[in-house]
Image: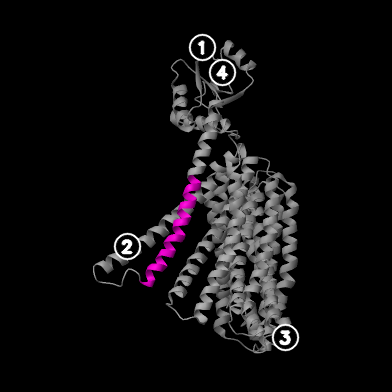
Amino acid sequence: MRTVRQIYFYAMAAVALEVAVWALVDLLSTTLAWRTVGADAGLLARGLSLTLVALPVFILHWIPAQRAAFRDEEERGALPRAVFLYAVLFVLLVAVVQNAVVILDRIFLDAMGLSAEATLFGSYRKPATNGIALVVNGLFAAYFASVLRADWKTNAPSALPGVRRLYRYLWVTYALGLLVAGVQQLLQYLASLPQLYLGGPVRQAWLANGLALLVLGAPLWMFEWRRVQQALVRTEERESLLRLGFLYFFSLVGAAIAVPCGAIALALLLRRLFGEAFSTSEMLGQLRVPLSLGLPAVTVWGFYSRQLRVDLEAVGDAPRRSALRRLYAYLLSLFGLGATVGGFVVLGATTVDIALGNVVWGGAMRTRLCTALATLASGLPVWLLTWTPMQAEAAAPGDAGDHARRSLTRRIYLYLAVAGGVLGTMGAAGSLLFLWLRALLGRGELPLAPRVFDLLVWLLAFGVVLAYHAAALRRDGRRAWSALASRYVRFPVLVLDRPDASFAQAVRLAAEREAPGLPVHVWSVPTEPPQITADIRAVVLPATFVLEAPEPLRQWLQGFSGLRVIVPDEPPAGYLWLGQKLRLLPDAARQTAQALRRLAEGQEARPAGTPAWQVVLYILAGLGGLQLLGGLVGLLVALLFRFWD
């Protein structure tokens, strides 16, 4: 109930606060206009009414929340309160920065003698309104910053560190967006200089907008990035999945923008090489957008991919480090594979049309051919540079090759490629069959119609993708089974159990499914230990045996040099296991067999650790969550400015 109450009070306080802040801005700006040049009474009434309604609602919810936090230190460090404070502070400070950008933009536009309509956003607002909004949001932000500083002084367990981490990376994202947008505007201005037909005011507006964004965005990004880098002295910051998720996000977004922009620029160059007549000025005009977007994207891609490599090198667990590195490589490889297949299909269809004389060579055909070549030339290097090292890693002998072949990321990639190949070939084959059957029934064109050759190109492209990746899957399976079978045989284990041996038999059956060939021996305590000639590598025993083991078993365990795997079971009277979730017998046996399999394969089996496949799924979910979060933040900012208007 406490958590539900906290969520209610802080959610209502957040909504009322935002309404009150912008209503107060509206009220003050309308009052200023009333005193100077006169204003609409309706605007004044709206600002006054919203202020008088929203401000009391905020106070009625914020004061009880503050009182509860002062009475209880645990309440002060609760997750709903931490999310509220950092979210409110972020929204208020973003409004401060946005209004500062508008003010700077208007200063630059006025200096260039341009109209305020060229402002990036808020062109219909008066400069005084921007100043009022900056001050009001800044005052509220200062207040909540002081509340946060007071909350940080508590010694109780708190959610503040985790929420602050997210808060800082959101600022890095926002500041990077300002910086990239500013660089894009300046590059667009520089690329437009040779274009005589483009009016001077348009170019100067790009210059003013770019300078305004850059003046605030560059120092803000440097400050925020330096702050998150300095925080890496703490272990929890270095090992944070959130940091890895953001690094993946920045790198992949940079690649997703840079590669298409590079393809567009290359297509324009090829069109001129193939004889399209346009001047250098016209060519720069068409290159203006892809270059102004592509160059910052390449920089972001290079910077954050390098930082990602540095962070991954610092991961101590080698299998986990390799899994995280593979995730990045396979995501890029999938992107490059899609661009390669798309470029090949368009190129093949275009080549067939030209060879058969179905089309007349001209501007449209030239553009189509150059676009296909540029797409292929942009996607193929990305796929080769990422896929080739992964193939070499999977083909390597030893433990590294085994882990690479059996990694979840590689299997997902291969199955996605196979699924894409199946769907593509199925669609092409179905369309071909439809055309032939319709022709045989006398209801359509001849089977050698141009459409047939296009479908054959489609079938060839996706058929190659399917055959190649299906062969890679089969090859991985053969190599993995051969390597694992030899490992399992060399890892005998001993399972200790009570006379009924129900747990041991369940573990034996689970091990046959998880690791076929793994030797499992059983010792039913308190009988004499069995005569085992193999070198036991691990012994599995219920946790109660640690407390109530008979003397022969205790002495045997003391002399055992291998690994002891303790499985939580029902504690005896007077004992309580904390931090352990008791499982049913089949679940406990399956979990034990999985741990033995990982040990036999040379992996770590840490109960408190996070498996690499879960890390991969967390990061994938984080990438999607970051996109959703960015959309929600953008929607919130848009709604606030719309309400302000």
Identify the residue position indicated by label 4 in the image. Answer: 534
- Asked if residue 110 is positioned above or below residue 509 in the image, the reply reads below
Query: Which of the pair 627/253 is nearer the observer?
Result: 253
Query: Which of the pair 328/48 is nearer the observer?
Result: 328
Dot 3 falls on a residue whose secondary structure is helix
Q: Residues within 10 Å of mark 3 (few under 14, many from 20)?
A: few
- Asked if residue 503 is positioned above or below residue 5 in the image, the reply reads above
Task: Indicate which disc residue 526 carries.
Answer: 1
Q: Does the residue at mark 4 contact the one at mark 3 (Cβ under 8 Å)?
A: no
Identify the residue position indicated by label 2 in the image. Answer: 433
Viewer-nearest of discs 2 and 3: 2
Whichever of labels 4 and 1 marks the residue nearer the N terminus, that label is 1
Q: Main secondary structure of the magenta part?
A: helix
Dot 4 falls on a residue whose secondary structure is loop
| Marks 2/3: CA–CA distance | 66 Å
| Residue type beneath disc 3 | Asp
Dot 1 falls on a residue whose secondary structure is loop
